[in-house]
Image: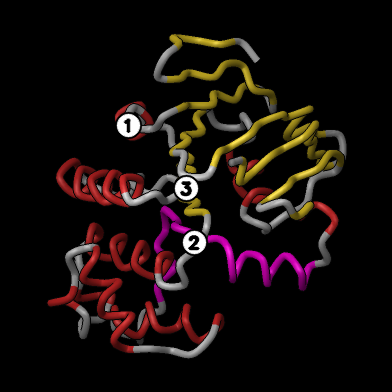
Amino acid sequence: MDLLELRDVSKDYGALKALQNINLTVKQGEWLAIMGPSGSGKTTMMNIIGCMDKPSAGEVLLDGVDISRESARGLTMIRRDKIGLIFQQFHLINYLTALENVMAAQYYHSIPDEKEALEALDRVGLASRARHLPSQLSGGEQQRVCIARALINYPMLILADEPTGNLDEANEQIVIEIFKKLHAEGSTIIVVTHDPEVAEDAERTVVLEHGRISRIIGPKQSEVLS
């Protein structure tokens, strides 16, 4: 079953063509990586998929809904209800504990539930650090809090932007192992990354160049030109 489909998606910022005629389908339960050099359109694509921006042309279907036609309020609700966002910069609230940061995501979705938030932290191996502030956590631990926060509302799509970009090798491996476990459990994951080691565990890798898909690398094919 297709969860996400981009149909002839383009995004212009004045004379700058950030994305040009992107066609891409992501199946439910798939793990997809998006790679490309700086300026290739990775962030723009993530922002459109993550309901943080709208395309200039084309359609974006998420769970059968054309999100390219939604209002700003509609996009906010879809992002809240259906997408778990994980950022390179963490974006934790510095005066809230790890547990409270996870519960904050519940607050905007439904009703904060401490037991559920603790279970989410336990899934990423941080139950024992639940009462610690971000300043008392390592970079790897802060990223795992972000993952727990992204999971708390049971999103249909996990969207991660350079999730290992600020981590050392050991913590990078911890985060990758968490993604592997989530994928094995049936989660749909899209990871934007510049790191081939992060992308190699994905089922497919989409490579962008100058706002276009230059190739798609899959498990049963070396390179397929788009």
Q: Mark 3 or mark 2, which has the lower sequence index?
A: 2
Dot 3 and dot 2 residues touching (CB under 8 Å): no
The span picked out in magenta is 72-92
Q: Secondary structure at mark 1?
A: loop
Dot 3 and dot 1 residues touching (CB under 8 Å): no
Q: Mark 2 or mark 1, which has the lower sequence index?
A: 2
* Residue kind at label 2, given as amino acid type: Gly
Where residue 127 sits: x, y (%)? 17, 75
Q: Residues within 10 Å of mark 3 (few under 14, many from 20)?
A: many
Residue wearing tag 1 = 201
- The quarter in which the C terminus is drawn is top right
**Front disc: 3 or 2:** 3
Q: Secondary structure at mark 2?
A: strand
Above or below residue 132? Residue 124 is above
At horizontal 86% and vertical 34% (from top left) the residue drawn is: 15
Q: Residues within 10 Å of mark 2 (few under 14, many from 20)?
A: many
At horizontal 23% and vertical 57% (from top left) the residue drawn is: 140
Where residue 87 sits: x, y (%)? 45, 56
* Mark 2–mark 1 distance (CA, rounded to whole Å): 20 Å
Q: Is residue 79 magenta?
A: yes
Above or below residue 147? Residue 27 is above
Residue wearing tag 3 = 188
* Residue kind at label 1, given as amino acid type: Asp
Where residue 42 sits: x, y (%)? 58, 37
Residue wearing tag 2 = 84
Q: Is residue 65 magenta?
A: no
At horizontal 75% and vertical 45% (from top left) the residue drawn is: 60
Q: Residue furthest front?
A: 1
* Residue kind at label 3, given as amino acid type: Thr
At horizontal 34% and vertical 27% (from top left) the residue drawn is: 200
